[in-house]
Image: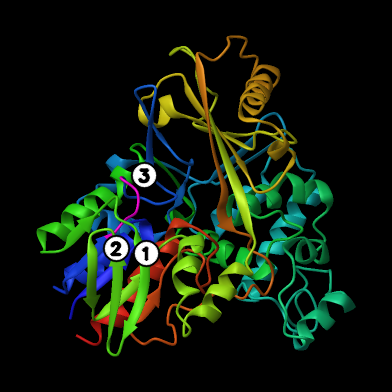
Amino acid sequence: MNTAIIGGGYAGMAAAVTLAERNIPVTVFESSKQLGGRARGVLYNDTQLDNGQHILLGCYHHTLNLIEQVGGNIEADFLRLPLQLTLHNRFELKTPHLPAPLHTLVGLLTAHGLSFAQRFSAMRFMLAMRKNNFTLPSPACGGGAGGEGTSLVENTLSPTLSRTQERGQDITAAELLRTYGQDEALIRLLWEPICISALNTPVHKASAQVLLNVLRDSLNGARSDSDILLPRINFSALLPERAAEYVKQRGGRIITSCSVDSIVPHGNETELVTAEGTQRYSHVICAASPSSATRLFRTVPQLAPIAAQIEAMTFQPIYTVYLQYPEHMRLPHPMLGFDQCFSQWLFDKGQIAGHHGLISAVISAEGLHQELDQDQLAQKVARELREQLGITEAPLWHKVIAEKRATFSCEPDLDRPALTTPLANVLLAGDYTAGDYPATLEGAVMSGIRCAREISQLA
C-alpha cells in the first residue's frame, strides 16, 4: 500500500501525519514552494507575515493535538486568552473564571454596551439552544423553548420557521436569531461578529445550524474550549513544516513545487501525472484547493459529478491588511474589534508575537472593501485607526493580502462533497468537504484525519 496526497495544506498534512504514524508509505505533492495552503507564512520587508490572520479556539482539539504530535508546544506557540470580545467603545464581553456554560451565561449578563433586556435576551437564546442540543428545533418541540413548560424563553417559533423545518431545511442565522428575539443592535454587536469570524459568511446568508455547531463546541464544553489562541509563529511553521519533518522521519516524501497534472484510474490503482513523471498509487487523497480539485476531477468520468458539485459552491473573501507602525505603537488589547468600520478585527503582533508596531486588520466576508484597490484599502484602515484610537503617526509600510476565495460561503443546506468518491481508492479532503464545521483549520484537519483513517483500515 502506498498513498499519494495532493496538496500540502492543513488537510493534506494532517492526512500525511496520520498515515505516517501508522507506517503507511505516503508522498505529498505540493504545487507551491511552501507548505500550508491558505494558511501559510509570507515573508515581506524582512518581516514574517501570514497570508491571513487565522485564530484557533480551545475546542479545536484535533488541530491542537496534531501540532503537539509533530513537536509543537501549545503554550509556547500561542498566546492563550480567555474568551473576550471587545468592540472599541461599543461592546465588551468578558467571561469570568467559572465552569462552562456558566462562564458564558454570566459573561452575557454582565456584558457592557447592551441594555439589561438585550443581555437577558442573549442569555435566554443560549439556554434555549442548549436545551435543543444546539440543533434547529422541529415543529414537534412546541416553540422556541424546545418543549412545554420552559419559561426561560418566551418567544415561540414563528409559523415561517416551523414550515421551514417541516421541509427539513436549514435556515439563515439571522432568521434564527430574530425568531428568538435578538434585536438588530444585539445581532450587530454580538452575534454577527461571532458569525462572520467563525463562518466567514454574513449573518443574513450564514447557516444557522453550522453556527450552532460552533457555539456548541466552543461555549458548551469545557471552559478552556472557548479560549482564543493567537499564534506566535507563522502558520507554515506552526504545523505543515513540522508535519513534513515528522513524515520524512517515517519514510514519507514531501515534494514541493510539483503540481499534479491529472488523475488516471487504473483498476485498483490510480496514476498521477506530475512534473516529476508518472507514478501509480494504491490510494490518493486529493487535499488540494477547491479550484484545483475541480480541475483534476472534471476529466475523470467517475469524479466529474463531484467537480460539478464543487463548482456550484460560492466563496467568500478574507482581506488582511498589515500596517507597520513605529515600534512603540500598541493597541489597548492584543485583539480588538471595531463596530461599523471596514476593519473588523485588529491584532497587535507586538503583544502576540514580538513584532512591535505591526498591526494586522482582518476584513472577513464580502463587502464594500472589495471595491477599493489595495493602497486605498490600507489608507482606509489607517484612517480608521486614527479616528478610533487616536493613532496619528503614519504607518511605515503596508501590505494587503487578499484571499478572494478564502472559504466557501457557509449557507443553509449547502451541498458539500463527501470524503469518499465513486472511485474507492480516491478520497477528498479539505475544509469545504461535508462536516459539522465551517471552513476552519479544524475542519480541514478533521477531514484529512478521516481520509487517512479510511485508508489505514484497509492496511
Q: CA distance from mark 1 to mark 3?
A: 27 Å
> Could you tell me which secondary element the residue under label 2 belongs to?
strand
Q: Label 2 belongs to which residue? A: 274
Q: CA distance from mark 1 to mark 2?
A: 5 Å
| Render colour scheme | rainbow
**Image location of residue 224, percent across then percent down:** 43, 54
Disc number placed over residue 261 in the picture, else none: 1
Left or right: residue 95 compared with residue 447: right
Which is more toward the observer, 361 or 69? 361
Which is more toward the observer, 238 or 109? 238
Q: Is residue 161 magenta?
A: no
Q: Tag 2: residue type?
A: Thr
> Could you tell me which secondary element the residue under label 3 belongs to?
helix
Chain-order first, disc 2 or disc 3:
3
Which is more toward the observer, 83 or 438? 438
Q: Does residue 70 show up?
A: no
> Could you tell me which secondary element the residue under label 1 belongs to?
strand
Q: Label 3 belongs to which residue? A: 235
Q: Which residues are magenta?
A: 29-33
Q: Tag 3: residue type?
A: Phe
Q: Is residue 31 magenta?
A: yes
**Image location of residue 85, percent across then percent down:** 60, 42
